[in-house]
Amino acid sequence: MIFSIECEILLRLISLNPLKGYVILNAAKLFFCSFIVSFSFHTVNPENDGRRLQEFLLNMEAAIRDHPLWAGATEEEVDCAMEGLEKYVMTKLFSRTFASFAEDAKIDQEILEKISLLQNFLRPEHLDIPAVFNNNASWLLAEKELQKINAFKAPREKLLCILNCCRVINNLLLNSSMSENRVPGADDFLPVLIYVMIKANPPQLHSNLKFIQLYRRQAKLVSEAAYYFTNLVSAKSFIVDLDGKSLSIDETEFHDSMQAARLVIKETRIKTPPALDKPADLPVPSRRLHNKGGSNYPFMEAEAGELTVGDVERLLSLYKDVVNNYTNLCRAIGHPPLSKLQPSFPHSEETNVLLEQPEEIMKTDHKAVE
C-alpha cells in the first residue's frame, strides 16, 4: 500500500494525545505534503497521476476505517474526512493536473470557437426541443451554474456545478411535462443540455471534464452524479462532431450560417477597444488643477469652486471612459454592472430545485431557488 507506514504513524500520533493539536496538524501536513511532492518525481501523465491519486485515496480511507480512533465514526464523518482530503490534495496539485498538456488546451480552444459560431444562429427548434420546454429563466440559471465551473480547483466542486446545472434542467422538464401527463426521458433531457451548454460556452470544457473523470473519487461518480456527468460528456461529444446533418436544419443553410458567424467574429476581433489616450480638441483644465501635487488624476482633490467651464467637457469625457471601462470589465469577469444587479428574471414557482453550494466561494446567486 502506498504510504501505508506513514498512514499508521499519523493515525497513531492522533490517538496519543488530542491536546497536542499542533503536533498532529504538523504531522498531517508533513504526511500529505510528502505525497504531493512525490508527484514531482514523475513526468506529467494525467492517466498515471489519476491512478496514483485514486489508489492513495482508497488506501487512506481503508487506513481511517481500520484505525481504533475512528471505530465509532459514522459513514458521514468518514466521507467528510475523505472529501476534505481530496480537496486539499487536488488544490495543491491543480497546476500540474489541470490542462497540463498542450493538446488539451488545443481541444478546449477548438470547442470554444465552435460554440461561439453556433451561438450566432442556433435555436431550440434546431435541436428538436419542444416549445413546452422553452423557459429562458430556467435556461439562464442553468447556464450560470455551468459557467462557474472554472471558479473551483477541487473536482467535487467542479462536479457540483454540473449537477446544479442538470438539476435545474431536470426540474424544468418535470414541471413542464406535468401538463402532458408524461415523464421526461433522456431524449428530452440531452437536447436541452446541449442547448444550455452552447449558450453558456463554459471555458476549458474538455479539460474540466477530463479533470473530474480522472481525479474525482470513483466511489462518488455513481448514481445521479454519474448520470449527469455522462450526459454532459455526451453533449460535448455531440458539439464536437456537430454538422448540418446533426440538426433539424438544411445543410446549405447550416454552412452559410457558420460562414456568416465566422465573418461576424472576425470583424469583432478586428475592432480594437477605444484608446485611453487624452481626447483631442477638448478644453484644457485649469493650470492650477492640472499641476496640483503632480497627480495623474487632477480632479481627485479638487474643490467645486476650483472648477471652470473649460473643465466640464474634460470631466464628461473622463466620466464616459470610466463607465465604459467599468462595463467592459464587468462583462469580461461575468459580473453585472451596478445598474444591472436587479434579477434579470422573476423567480418561478416552477423552479424549486435546491442547488448545492461549493465551499470555495460564497455568492449570492448560488443559492436555493424558491
Image (cartoon, rainbow, N blue to C red):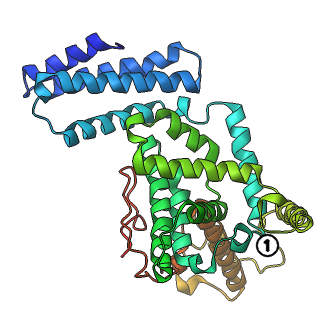
Instruction: Kindly state the secondary structure of the residue where label 1 is placed.
Output: loop
Query: Going by the picture, which residue comes out furthest to the bottom?
Result: 309
Position of 342 compared to 86: left or right? right
Query: In the rendered view, would you say 219 is above or below 170?
Result: above
Q: Looking at the rendering, which quadrant does residue 12 occupy?
A: top left
Q: Residue at x 36, y 57 (%)?
A: 357
Q: Nearer the viewer, residue 63 or 175?
A: 175
Quadrant into which the N terminus falls: top left
Q: Is residue 264 left or right of residue 305?
A: right
Image coordinates of residue 134 in percent, x first then y, are 60, 78
Q: Position of residue 42 (x, y in %)?
A: 54, 14
| Image side of residue 69 versus residue 48, left or right | left
Q: Is residue 54 above or below residue 311?
A: above
Q: Quadrant of the C terminus?
A: bottom left
Residue nearer the viewer, 78 or 201: 78
State the residue in front, 151 or 185.
185
Label count reads 1
Q: Give x and y (percent) for residue 255.
A: 89, 62
Look at 41% across and 64% down and name the residue there: 366
Q: Residues within 10 Å of mark 1 (few under 14, many from 20)?
A: few
Horizontal arrangement in the rendering, residue 241 relative to residue 259 (left or right): left
Location of residue 299 in the rendering, given as x and y in whole percent from the top left corner: 59, 74
Can the viewer see residue 158 in this picture? no
- The residue furthest front is 181
Residue 43 appears in the picture as rendered: yes
Disc 1: which residue: 279
The amino acid type of the residue labelled 1 equals Pro
